[in-house]
Image (spheres, grey):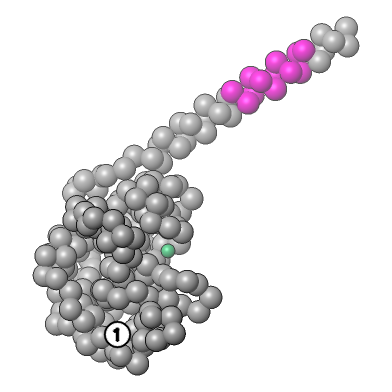
Amino acid sequence: MQKRKEKKIQFRKKTSAYIIGMALLLFLSGLDLPNFGQESGVEMENKITLVPIGDIKAETLKVLSSHLKETFSSQVKIHEAMELPEEAYNPKREQYFSSRLMNKLRSFIKPEPEEKILGIADVDLYVHGLNFVFGEAELSGHFAIISLARLRQSFYGLPDDKPLFFERVKKEAVHELGHAFGLNHCPNPDCVMHFSNSLGDTDRKSASFCLRCLGILKKRAT
Ligand SMILES: [Zn+2]
Ligand SMILES: [Zn+2]
């Protein structure tokens, strides 16, 4: 009798685990729809201005600007370049201090109320307490910055791969701008707002927002 009861309980446990599993699967697959295309971009009235910091290739800016236009349904302008501030260079680390670049950017350009400014630097960046950063952004603010240095295969002694480089640039730019538009990190590993601890994480995620993040962005825009 006792055994039967146990079996029944076990069966119930298994069934409920199965139901929870299926529900979770459905929930996750609902969140995991990548690449919403042009129609499902974030429809809001906003402006994004790209500011090259130092010398940035025109092709990179062009690829980035059309991707951001589509993703944020936004006007994208390319501003004249800001000089790379040499005082931000730390010779001991052979890196530039990201927060100083951000400060310089803040005094270089005054944003309009709905404008987001993305600085693009081709030098390796760091902040205190971290070995390096791919980028930095003000949460719900105007300014964000990305570094291209670690997005190239050649940084790791591998042959360069242009399409892969552009994919990484898009992801880092959308991620940092996502913070500027008020998004925090997302637990969905396919979502562009997922935290990248390494380039492997960046390569694993898509260049698009998951439905949850897209929902938050659209809500903020209305
Ligand atoms: Zn982030
Ligand atoms: Zn997300």
Q: Main secondary structure of the magenta part?
A: helix
Q: Position of residue 33 (x, y in %)?
A: 34, 39
Direction front: furthest residue: 157
Quarter of the figure with residue 1 = top right
Query: Element type at marker 1?
Result: helix
Report whether residue 52 is seen. Answer: yes
**Residue 136 in the figure: left or right of residue 41:** right
Residue 100 in the image, given as x and y percentages of width and height = 38, 86
- Residue drawn at x 18%, y 56% is 162
The span picked out in magenta is: 7-18
> Crowding at label 1, few (<14), some or many (≥20) Cα neighbours within 10 Å?
many
Q: Tell me the residue at 38%/79% (across/down).
A: 95
Q: Is residue 221 visible?
A: no
Dividing the image into four quarters, tell me where ligand 1 lies: bottom left
| Residue 46, placed above or below residue 163 | below
Which residue is at the front of the view, 111 or 176?
A: 176
Query: What amino acid is labelled 1 in the image?
Result: Leu
Q: Residue at x 76, y 18 (%)?
A: 9
Residue 157 falls left or right of residue 38: right
| 14 lies left or right of 78 | right
Residue found at x 63% / y 26%: 17
* Quadrant of the drawing holding the C terminus: bottom left
Given residues 165 and 181, the one toward you in this image is 165
Q: Quadrant of residue 20?
A: top right
Q: Is residue 166 magenta?
A: no
Residue 13 appears left or right of 33: right
- Residue linked to disc 1: 105
Picture quadrant of residue 34: top left
Question: In front here: 21 or 172?
Answer: 172
